[in-house]
């Protein structure tokens, strides 16, 4: 479990001035050398469409269609403050640029590392390796970290390609992106357990406490397939 994440956010607030801010030229060079993957990132995994042409598709391949302000952390240090960040859920990459006014073509991809995590507005994203390696690993949004368990979200997207009209009475259908998040319970040893999509199967995850959780869900009229209700149940379960 990465309980350290939340603690770190609190601790670093007081010394943000000492971080490598993008306003300093040396900081820019050092940060670029340490964290950026200098490649043609934006041209990869774009599903054959221009992500910048938002009128050509429905939905968004990103956590938010626009860049938002945030911070980058490494281990116990705030590494860059007040930078522009955007999570690309299709490519599973964190895009970063100097400021909101910087051209999108100047953005780069943050190096994937379990030592590096970001805070975009109020959302915290960590990178978790797979079987000890970067390949196969991915970004997760931290929704909750308790004393016993946490709730993490993998912000996945489904993609449907553009479909041209087949007859004169039908119409073209634009390409589309749809949210298909997957939720994980994370134990204190850092093991990830994927939650099933079924409400009934979610209840079975709680094992010996299934009846108690089921009663709690009924008492408050909760829906385990709704993120806020699931989060409430996980917080309650953490008190057992």
Image: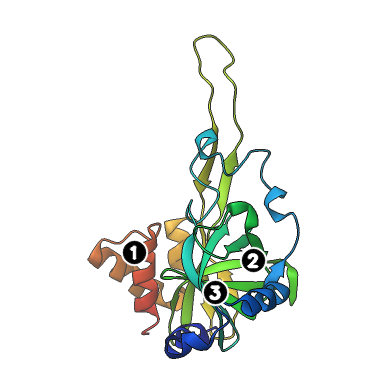
Q: Nearer the viewer, residue 103 or 5?
A: 103
Kindly identify which residue carries mark 3: 23
Q: Residue 8 at x, y = what percent? A: 49, 87
Q: Which mark is residue 138?
A: 2
Between the C-alphas of marks 3 and 2, the distance is 29 Å
Classify residue 85 as left or right of residue 10. Answer: right
Q: Quadrant of the N terminus?
A: bottom right
Q: Quadrant of the C terminus?
A: bottom left
Between the C-alphas of marks 1 and 2, the distance is 25 Å
Q: Residue at x 68, y 78 (%)?
A: 30
For marks 3 and 2, the one nearer the N-term is 3
Whether residue 131 is visible, yes or no, is no
Kindly identify which residue carries mark 1: 229
Whether residue 14 is visible, yes or no, is yes
Q: Residue at x 54, y 30 (%)?
A: 174
Classify residue 220 as left or right of residue 121. Answer: left
For marks 1 and 3, the one nearer the N-term is 3
Q: What secondary structure is found at the residue carrying circle 2?
A: strand
């Amino acid at each position: 479990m990465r309980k350290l994440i939340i603690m770190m956010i609190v601790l670093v607030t007081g010394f943000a001035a000492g971080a490598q801010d993008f306003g300093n030229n040396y900081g820019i060079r050092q940060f670029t050398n340490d964290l950026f993957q200098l490649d043609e990132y934006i041209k990869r995994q774009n599903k054959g469409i221009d992500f910048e042409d938002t009128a050509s598709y429905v939905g968004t391949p990103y956590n938010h269609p626009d860049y938002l302000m945030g911070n980058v952390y490494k281990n116990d240090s705030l590494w860059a403050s007040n930078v522009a960040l955007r999570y690309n859920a299709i490519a599973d990459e964190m895009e970063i640029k100097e400021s909101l006014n910087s051209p999108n073509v100047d953005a780069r991809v943050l190096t994937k590392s379990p030592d590096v995590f970001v805070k975009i507005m109020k959302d915290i994203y960590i990178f978790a390796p797979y079987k000890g390696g970067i390949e196969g690993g991915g970004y997760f949004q931290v929704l909750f970290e308790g004393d016993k368990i946490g709730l993490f979200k993998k912000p996945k997207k489904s993609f449907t390609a553009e479909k041209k009209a087949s007859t004169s009475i039908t119409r073209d259908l634009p390409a589309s992106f749809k949210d298909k998040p997957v939720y994980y319970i994370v134990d204190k040893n850092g093991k990830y357990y994927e939650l099933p999509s079924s409400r009934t199967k979610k209840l079975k995850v709680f094992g010996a406490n299934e009846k108690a959780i089921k009663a709690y869900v009924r008492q408050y009229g909760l829906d385990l397939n709704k993120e806020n209700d699931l989060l409430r149940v996980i917080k309650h379960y953490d008190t057992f």
